[in-house]
Amino acid sequence: MATTSRIFMTVLQRIKLLSILDVLFILILVTLPLGVYVINSIAVAFFFVYAFYLNIKTKQGFHFSRLGYFFVALYILFVFSLIWTNNIENTRLGLERFLSYLILPITFALLHKSKINKNLVLKIFSNTLVLYAIYCISFGVLKVLRFGDKKFLFYHDLSGNLSQLNAIYLSVFTSLAICFLLFKEVKSKKDYIKATFLMLFLLLLSSKIIIATVFTIIGFRFFFTITKKINFKKWLLYLPFFLIIIALSSYKLSNRIKVEFQETNLSEVLETKDFGHVYLWTGFGLRAFQVKVFFEIVKEKEVFWLGLGLNNSQDVLKEKYKEYNLYPGFYYYNFHNQYLQVFAELGFIGLILLLSAFYIILRKAINTKDYFLLSFIILILVVCITESFLWRQRGMVCFIALALLLTKKNNYILD
């Protein structure tokens, strides 16, 4: 009875620490992995409405951060692209889809003097990712027992248990949770246990580039920052456990890497004029082909400076797929590269605006020695190489919301 009472009081104290702003921001983050986009959009809308109300109530004025200015400038470029796009309807729909680039910076401008409990928000987000991981693994195990196929514990088959979620996106969210748990100034045994479990989950998700990035970030942090504080004898006791985790979870990952190396013929991808519907594509091979046709599109359409117009590259890319006789299932694949996607639709100017936003975040992380912010921007920079991450609801809201939160001056931290 006494134990139950203590747990209840602890939960109650945590709830009291949360303001309405904290709760609304948490809702934005924890609804990102859910399949129904409208839930996340509603969370963003409530956050904006409450910020507007709070601004009027407290009379705190209106002030954009430097990063906020770049997001708004990017959205203004979205609007101006209506002038040169050859499909106004596509661009109009894009303006609706990408409203987060305008709404979230305005929200933070309204809240420039308000405080958000960054640490507690990220802690709840990380704990939620643990629950999502348990959910996915549990359903994966049940499917393995039912169908006798191990594939349900790996990659898209594993992440798909959570509203058909793409493994790459769930890998990014999981990686952020891992970095937060490991880079906190004050860490508990529970934090290490949760981070270890999420590492196992990340390995099962089998995203090669995300796994390599996360372990590189953790490695640099470990060897160059906290080596003097580490009890190596204690960590050596954990080493066999980590090796067992890697061995158990790397089955699917190693097979995927093997296939990429064995099946990708780069010269063939770059030189073939007619692939046919049965050509065997690997992830790397397809992305190399997309880089090739990107340069062809920029040259043929003469869109170096301003691009084709927001949300207007898919039709042109589809024509390229047809020209090279790819299987029709690929016709709706985008560039799978955020840098190419921005350049194709908004030209060199759009790419410069996006890279400027990245630079502001990176500089802030380095100047403040904020290792979580640094890991965040590194993950974004890397995932943008293989995915049009910021052109999808989950990706854009995750990036914009966390970037504005983590660079906000009036945050406070409670452990």
Image (cartoon, helix red, strand yellow):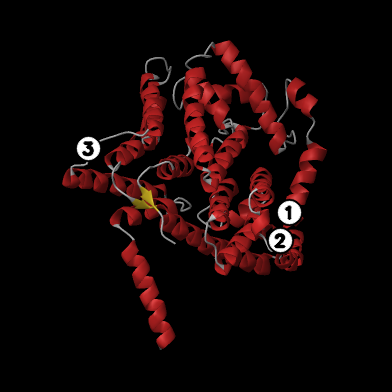
Mark sitting earlier along the chain (3/1): 3
Q: Nearer the viewer, residue 261 or 179?
A: 179
The x and y percentages for residue 154 are 66, 56
Q: CA distance from mark 2 to mark 3?
A: 56 Å
Which residue is depicted at the point 39% across and 50% down?
28
Q: Residue at x 54, y 38 (%)?
A: 366
For the residues labelled 1 and 2, say whether their Cβ atoms are less than 8 Å apart.
yes
Of labels 2 and 3, earlier in sequence is 3
Q: Amino acid at mark 1?
A: Lys
Query: Label 3 is placed on what type of residue?
Result: Gly
Q: Position of residue 122 (x, y in %)?
A: 45, 55
**Residue at the disc numbered 2:** 150
Question: Residue 319 in the image: x percent, y percent?
Answer: 58, 22
**x%, y% of residue 404?**
41, 41
Image point (51%, 32%), residue name: 358
Q: Quadrant of the C terminus?
A: bottom left
